[in-house]
Amino acid sequence: MNGEHIKKIKGVEEMLLDVGTLLMSNGASTGRVRTTVNRIAGALGYEVELLITSRSLMLTVTEENGSDYTSSVRRTPPHAVNFRIVSGISRMSWRVIEDNLSVEQINIEITRLTSLPHYPRLLVLSLVALSGASFCRLFGGGWLEMLVTFMATFVGLFIRQEAIKHRFNPYMAIVFASFAASLISGLSVKMGIGSTSDHALATSVLFLIPGVPLINSLTDLIDGNTLNGIVRGVNGFIIAFAIALGLMFAMQLYGI
């Protein structure tokens, strides 16, 4: 019977590690990861101890009577941002309480969430480029500068996606993207296209700003998760430095 209990707890543990790594790698804060994992475990009748770092999770699952327990460590994949998965897992965690979902049903829902198709690449490129053009307009750019920003952002994001696809260092991918976007928008400054072409240069790299890492860094620091907050903050500042590096190379090339 003890062996059956351990096997059952091991299944719960693997499911909770799946939940934790998915949340951590898709843009959730440390506090949200811990709260969601504890919520699901409590609804299933287990107690958990969770150690969260930026690159791994250590989880101990114990039955409420303390008779059996199991522990595991799992490395988290490289961090990205996918709020569809984060919100989907959050909703599922409440359904575990309200609908008494079993471990098998939770695993089916996790599989469904992870297999959801991504938005078409052209749509993502176009909408991100449109957001860059909107920022240019917000900062006072005209229609011509908005068009330049749209093209620069589109190409910059495309370069970044290709660099990631070819397994370049993520920070170098940001340098390449920033340089490519700055080359296009900087050309408008060099040629004097538009009356406020410097707005296009300034806003063409905004799509690279590390908003999620910096917000999560502040959230983790406020919640007392100091180590993760510092790591995420440093990551955000390195990304900002990579953006500035690409922008500087383009400006030096044009002598701006």
Image (tube, grey):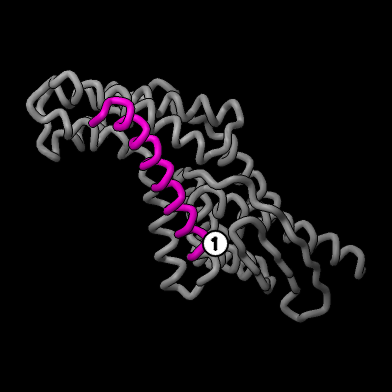
Tell me residue 232's x, y (percent).
Answer: 49, 58
Q: Is residue 139 above or below residue 38?
A: above
Tell me residue 49's x, y (percent).
Answer: 67, 73
Give the crowd class for mark 1: few <14, some 14-19, many >=20 residues within 10 Å: many
Tell me residue 250's x, y (percent).
Answer: 33, 29
Tell me the residue that label 1 is attached to: 33
| Direction from residue 111 to residue 33 in the image, left or right | left
| Direction from residue 103 to residue 69 in the image, left or right | right
In the foreground, 108 or 227: 227
Work out which quarter of the rendered image holds the N terminus and state it. bottom right
**Where is residue 195, by image quadrant?**
top left
Residue 251 in magenta stretch? yes
Q: Examine the rendering and report whether any part of residue 127 can be seen.
A: no
What residue is drawn where x is 72% and y is 78%?
Answer: 64
Tell me residue 57's x, y (percent).
Answer: 67, 61
Q: Is residue 233 above or below residue 163?
A: below
**Where is residue 34, by image quadrant?**
bottom right
Q: Is residue 93 above or below residue 208?
A: below
Residue sticking out furthest to the bottom: 65
Residue range of the region highlighted in magenta in the rendering: 230-256
Residue 240 in magenta stretch? yes
What residue is drawn where x is 70% and y is 50%?
Answer: 104
Q: Examine the rendering and report whether any part of residue 198 can be seen.
A: yes
| Direction from residue 100 to residue 252 in the image, left or right | left
Q: Amino acid at mark 1?
A: Val
What residue is drawn where x is 24% and y is 27%?
Answer: 149
| Direction from residue 199 to residue 52 in the image, left or right | right
What residue is drawn where x is 52% and y is 61%?
Answer: 231
Q: How many marks?
A: 1
Work out which quarter of the rendered image holds the C terminus and state it. top left
Looking at the magenta stretch, what is its main secondary structure? helix
Q: Secondary structure at mark 1?
A: helix
